[in-house]
Amino acid sequence: MNIRNCVSYRLDGKKVWVAGHRGMVGSAVVRRLASEGCDILTASRTELDLRRQSDVEAWMDRFRPHAIIVAAATVGGILANDTHPAEFLYDNLAIEANIIHGAKQFGAEKLLLLGSSCIYPRLADQPIQEDALLTGPLEPTNQWYAVAKIAGIKLCQAYRRQFGSDFISAMPPNLYGPNDNFDPVSSHVLPALMLKAHRAKREGRREIELWGTGKPRREFMYVDDLADALVYLLQVYSGEDPVNVGVGYDVTISELAEMIMCVVGVDAQIRFNSSIPDGTPRKLLDSGRLLSMGWRPETDLEQGLRKLYAWYLQTESLNSEVSLG
Ligand code: GFB
């Protein structure tokens, strides 16, 4: 890391707003911040629609957060991205613009925007370094989300250049963990396959469906590791360049399916549904910049899958108790 980008920002005693605190990433950030001695601010969706600028400004004026983590976003898997382009573009542009502009207006000391590895060109050299941004065409299935996230990164850079605002951005790979969306149509691949494997086991079926060819490679990170990295970056990093936050290895979708079936405890055949696209062939991040700052992930994929399946079973049984009661 360039020594000029290295800072020490203390969180104790600060008001830290986690925008999107009910989502998978936001809830992990709230868990991680609990030990930092800060005052965690949150706003529910009914209390605050982040797409409405005047509401966001009124809320920020009232609460005046010192630091902000922008984990709020409209997200989804490959099919949701491909079929809801307007929501993925508009919602994310509006959320980022409102929060970033409000942060400047109401004097936030620090802001971290969460991006995604899909901001990089579809055929970027692997592993992908941060400076690959805007060097080639995007993957068409998620270009809307990617363009919104690129605009968010550029907003952070622009406010830093023009106003000296300490706004930074971090790019994670494909994430998974508690509070993920398990809807089979709109979710990302990992929860979708866990749900399919779980249902096959419960119903005694010997087949699960995989979209595409199973050949694309993806890098998966457990969300509590991401939350730890985000809090670390908030404390030590101040710079214009986005920072990749990955685990350093990837697997094919077929390999992921085999691992998930092993964790769930089901032996099923895979049937490929080639009517749904593969998306990017590969998007492995080069996280060397973050590693050079002294941060390391803790959870390997198999451990993470076991933790997530345990969480899923517990949540499912709690939900069934609630619906029975
Ligand atoms: O996770 P996923 O939906 O999104 O799909 P992306 C990853 C790969 O898994 C694709 C395949 O090749 C899918 O075709 N796949 C196989 C499945 N079976 C399934 C299934 O049952 N459900 C799903 N969802 N996929 C997302 C972007 O791209 O990556 C987002 O759309 C975001 O915007 C995220 O950037 C990180 O990895 O292709």
Image (cartoon, helix red, strand yellow):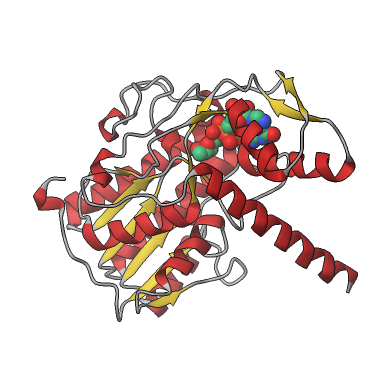
Residue 32 at x, y = what percent?
43, 66
Q: Position of residue 283 (x, y in %)?
A: 43, 29
Q: Nearer the viewer, residue 308 or 56?
A: 308
Residue at image coords 45%, 73%: 59
Depicted 136 relative to depicted 67: above or below = above
The residue most toward the left is 4
Q: Which residue is more in the foreground, 128 or 158? A: 128
Could you say which quadrant of the image residue 65 lies in? bottom left
The answer to whether residue 81 is above or below residue 23 is above
Query: Residue 324: x, y in percent?
Result: 90, 69
Ligand 1: image quarter: top right
Q: Is residue 230 above or below residue 192?
A: below
Quadrant of the image containing the N terminus: top left
Q: Seen in the image, is 63 located left or right of residue 77? A: left
Residue located at (73% from left, 21% from top): 273
Q: Is residue 279 visible?
A: yes
- Tell me: 305 left or right of 197: left
Looking at the rendered structure, the number of numbered marks drawn on it comes to 0
Q: In the image, residue 89 lies at what x, y percent?
A: 52, 40
Quadrant including the C terminus? bottom right
Q: Residue at x 78, y 30 (%)?
A: 268
Q: Is residue 241 left or right of residue 245?
A: left
Q: Is residue 186 visible?
A: no
Q: Residue at x 41, y 45 (%)?
A: 115
Residue 203, above or below 267: below
